[in-house]
Image (cartoon, rainbow, N blue to C red):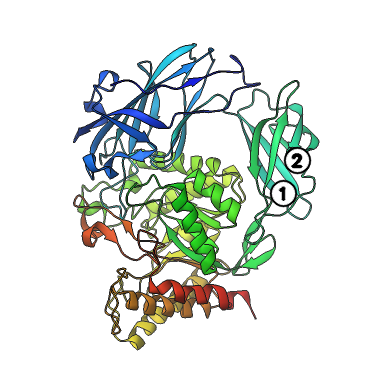
Amino acid sequence: MKNALFVVALAAVAGLVGAPRPLDLNGTWDFRFEEGKSWQQVDAAAFTATDPIIVPGCFDAMPKWFMKRGTGLYRRTFTLDAAVDNAWLVVDGLGLYGTFKIDGRDIGVDALPWSRVELATGPLAAGVHTLVAAVDNRFDWSYQKLVRTYYDFHCWGGFFHGVSLSFDNRKLFVRTRDYKTGTVEIEAVNFSATDFETTLVFDSRNEVKASFKGGRATVKVPDFKLWSTDHPNLHTVAIREPSQPLTLSTRFGIRTVEAKNGGIYLNGERIFLKGANRHDQQLQSGAATPESFMLTDIQNLKAMGGNFFRGAHYPQSQRFLDLCDEHGVLVWEESLGWGNGQTYTFKRIDGNNELTDPGFIARQLEQTTLMVRNSFNHPSVIIFAYMNECNSGTKECKALSDQLIAAIRKEDSGRLITFACNMISSDICHEGTDIIAFNTYPGTINGYPGSHEELVEKIHNMKGHGVDWTVEYFQKKYPGKTIIISEMGSAGLYGQRDPSAPVDTENFQEEHNNAVAEAVWNNPGIAGIAYWQYFDTRTCGRECTQDGKKHIAMSWAGLFDSNRRPKLVVRTLTDWFTNKKPANLGK
């Protein structure tokens, strides 16, 4: 099969001044799937392709390899008109483990599923080059330390949001230092010097002289406008280098977020988070969600009066965050994890407690730090989090949690830090977070619903799970901390309607989530909620162990179905989101 070919003409051959734009490597690649085999068991250097495949895309969402596990072998060529001293292969999310070669030479491994990863290529000569990737979607604890068979969402294989080749790895990180005056601090990352004079150009027209010391410079943005949910104003900053066009154009927003007085404040104004948990998924394309579906999700949320997505349960696509920036949607982003260290997870598989495994700990710290850096300039991201539903009542979880908090704080990104806790009565890890977030399912996962009156009572007061009970408990344990609900909801199968509202019908889902809204909106101690979940998603299939199993491998708790058709509950939550003022915002 003929190799896919791409040609790029380079404007410069050495150094970074005048470096060309990134080379898009998306499109048709040569492909071969080796079912059941790991990346170590295949010959990536000299495989015979059997099919073409499209990048981005998930091979296990395609009919020929649907839901199969093994290693996908990818190959394409590209041409450089001039030599380069270095370049960086940019992988914008893959699953679940990838190795890469250029011209038969190893250039690195991507062991961070869903993350945007850059791999240095080293010198590349002028001419044709062959890029080969082995992408393994198997669960193998010996080398893939971040995914487990019990995770309650499908772990896809392939390239999620594309591949490119970059010729400049310098970056500008922008920190809002004073939103009232438009003062920002700009950090120059991966520059050859840390102390230098330059000209910054804001919004392609406003020049500001800047003196960088230790890689940082503080300046005021001319004609600045704040970023907010109602007015998502964005700015750009670039560097003007002598006799060169503008370089390193970086988009950012000026805004601050704080947690204080039991609330959340955006640019000094108290806000209430109204939204849902969202997986990066579309059934026909897996985790390679088309941009049209991303935009559909954002438009539907805004139409409901919502303002908040919790990105579950891994780093988010940079393109999705771009769209959230542009449309004024607030985002919680978290590194990959689910139920780590729980007795109902690892003890029922192989006995390997992730929370004490050096490889898992190292990968958690690596991915969490990378998540912060990748999303640094997205004003939509107001919360960084980690390890959904970890066993936060244990000392080993507290030790790792504290390390992750310290890693996020070290980056000085100005975001709030938390994690989603389901060990409410025993939690010790929220001691170091900025806000308390909890997942709870009274009357559904936690107990049965009973009559409407019984369901309402459980939603409010069920010990260890009820909204009012949990808020009172956390307020006593962690006085003064802001509290939000990171998961709460119930299933409702699209089209299943029954006026008696049996469990799993749209009617029951609407009744349940309306009762949740009533409890949340009337409790002054709650600063926001992310319903579980935004749309129906595929979860783990037959390989799924223990508590992760779901009816026909789907989670039906979406407010919308997998095709983004609204269920009955959408009309109810639209009324709450749009017309009713939460007690947390005061009178």
* Residue 480: quadrant of the picture: bottom right
- Residue reaching furthest front? 2
Q: Is residue 454 left or right of residue 170?
A: left
Residue at screen point 45% across, 74% down: 571
Marks 2 & 1, CB-CB < 8 Å contact = yes
Quadrant for the C terminus, please: bottom right
Q: Can you tell which mark lies on residue 4?
A: none
Residue 365 placement (x, y as % from top left): 45, 42
Asked if 81 appears above or below 261 in the picture, the reply is above
Give me the C-alpha separation between circle 2 and circle 1: 9 Å
Quadrant for the N terminus, please: top left
Asked if 163 appears above or below 512 in the picture, the reply is above
Mark 1 neighbour class, 10 Å CA radius: few under 14, some 14 to 19, many 20 or more = some
Q: Can you tell which mark lies on residue 177?
A: 1
Residue 585 placement (x, y as % from top left): 62, 74
Residue 124 placement (x, y as % from top left): 48, 14
* Residue assigned mark 2: 218
Residue at screen point 61% across, 18% down: 11
Out of 414 and 78, give the one closest to the viewer. Answer: 78
Out of 512 and 24, give the one closest to the viewer. Answer: 24
Asked if 269 appears above or below 544 in the picture, the reply is below
The disc labelled 1 sits on which kind of residue?
Arg
* Residue 33: quadrant of the picture: top left
The disc labelled 2 sits on which kind of residue?
Thr
Residue 584 placement (x, y as % from top left): 58, 75
